[in-house]
Amino acid sequence: MWSNFTYEDEVLGLEPELRMYNAGGCRKNGGGRIKLIAGNKECMSFPVNQDESVKADLIQTNQKKAFLLIRTYKDSANGSSSCKNMWLIGKTGDGFVTYATKATLDQAGLVYDDIVPKVHDGQLEIMSIARCYAMGVNGTRGPIGEKYRGHKIHILDSWYAAANSVYFFWDENAQWFGFRLVE
């Protein structure tokens, strides 16, 4: 579906161009792309694979800057999801630029199934979400061990844990994002 939001006093839209198919009586995404539209102009587009969903977050920092975090994810039958792609977008002059992607998270060392964005003191935190659960001998679900992909986990609930986070911070001199990994 089409989504509109206000970004630095400008109305932007995300317009899907997706092929659809029917399976089991349900209409499903067959893949395509999502377009970022400003006015009547297409600024960027992002690939969406078959059976992926799209989420866009408007990120406001304390420095009165705004950024878009667009991600695709695949839902599992058990209600969990996994991040398939991610783009951190910002405005430069009359256009938009991609500051970071899923590859940036991977290069920084984030280990995750899914991600959750948060803003802390003007910095964007991308927190890893790990599915760390199994059926125990007494029939209860719980985390598997104390580590996820070699990283100590912080248990969020009986289904999920956080392993580490990547913090993005705006470097005013470079006019670009810096980032650091936090365990």
Image (tube, rainbow, N blue to C red):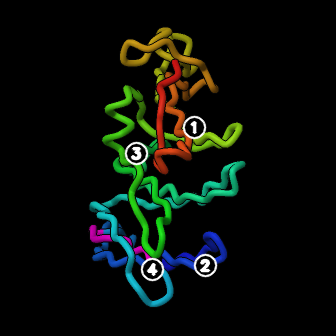
Task: Give the Cα distance between marks 3 and 2.
Answer: 28 Å
Q: Residue furthest front?
A: 173
Discs 3/1, front: 1
- The answer to whether any part of residue 182 appears in the image is yes
Discs 2/4, front: 2
Discs 3/2, front: 2
- Looking at the image, tell me whether mark 3 or mark 2 is earlier in sequence order: 2
- 41 or 175, nearer to the observer: 175
- The answer to whether any part of residue 25 appears in the image is no
- Looking at the image, tell me whether mark 3 or mark 1 is earlier in sequence order: 3
Q: Disc 4 marks which residue?
A: 37
Q: Is residue 32 magenta?
A: yes
Specify start and end residues of the magenta stretch as a single range.
30-37
Task: Give the Cα distance between marks 4 and 1.
Answer: 26 Å
Task: Give the Cα distance between marks 1 and 2.
Answer: 25 Å
- Other residues around mark 2 within 10 Å, as few (<14) / some (14–19) / many (≥20): few
**Tag 4, which secondary structure?**
strand
Tell me: residue 119, above or below residue 57: above
- Tell me what residue is drawn at x 41 percent, y 29 percent: 110
Task: Give the Cα distance between marks 3 and 1.
Answer: 15 Å
Q: Disc 2 marks which residue?
A: 10
Secondary structure of the magenta portion, mostly?
Answer: strand
